Image: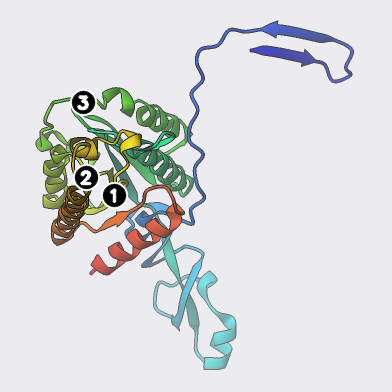
Amino acid sequence: MHVDCTDDWQMFHATAVMPIAAPTVLPRPERLAGTPATNTVLSRVGEHPSRQGGSGIEFTAIRPYQIGDQLRDVHWAASSRQRRTMVTVRAADLAADLIIAIDVFGDIAGTPQQSTLDVSVRAATTLVGTALAHRDRVGVIAVGGLLQWLTPATGRIHLYRIADLILSTRAAQISVVNPDPSRLPGQMLPPDAQVIVLTPLADERIMPVLHNLARRRLHTSIIDVLGHPRPNRSAGSIAFARRRHATPHGDDLAERLWQLDRAATHADLVRLGMPVQVWTGDTALQLTISDVARAWQRRRP
């Protein structure tokens, strides 16, 4: 790397050559209005308006004065009209815990520049950046033969730690080890945490982990990064590797059976209380996150 240095008056100039290692490039995150974690917040100061009354800035209602109300909350215009003291009610600004789980058991190629793990990394980077910008606590779990995790925290330093873990998931991709769902650390999954699992649902070893999350009764949602693609032999997809010698009629039948099997898997996960949304990177992530938020909103008591 060549570095050129000059002073403010352009009188002196120096050039230096500095050797650097291979650069690490993070995916460009998309712009999101928010994360699904905004629908279930905790009793901790943050930036999300909640249903609870508090000292936030979001206006919710006007009610009669009660003992203990502060003078600054008096709504003078409404008080003069009602001929009694009225106060404004504001929503408390609270924060949430968001856990991103990435399935690294396999990487199914879709196009030469995009695979299921690439899509998962893009989605995780966007969600983490948006949640940390809202001052939520964010944690990451890389589910594979080598279980990696970062406990929920906030701050820019934590963002860099998460980026290092996300970018290292490909190194732990190839593994024949079956994970033990009981190894998921308790401090990694705090109560009332929101969990988003990014997975192609192509490896059966991820299912015990999903069942474990369902038993913990967390707010869990699954984003299927594979969807229902049509077979593409030139892409080298392992999902269709066994069908390269099949007849055309057998190709159509195998494809229909495979799609029915994936639809049944989605239905089983929904029955466990984990809504499933599909995002393959071809559309805006905001649309999928909005669907996830609506699914969590319907589950709220």
- Give above or below for 281 relative to 57: above
On the rendered structure, is 82 left or right of 269?
right
Pointer 3: residues within 10 angstroms few (<14), some, or many (20+)?
A: some
Which of disc 2 and disc 3 is earlier in sequence?
A: 3
Q: Which mark is residue 146?
A: 3
Residue type at the position of mark 1: Asp
Mark 2 lies on residue: 201
Q: Nearer the viewer, residue 154 or 116?
A: 116
User: Which residue occupies 40% across, 44% down?
Assistant: 123
Q: Which of pointers 3 and 1 indicates the residue nearer the eye?
A: 1
Q: Nearer the viewer, mark 3 or mark 2?
A: 2
Which quarter of the picture shows residue 297?
bottom left
* Dot 2 crowding, Cα within 10 Å, few <14, some 14–19, many 20+: many
Q: Which residue lies under the disc numbered 1?
A: 224
Q: Amino acid at mark 2?
A: Leu
Going by the image, does 85 lie left or right of 185?
right
- Say which quarter of the image contains residue 277: bottom left
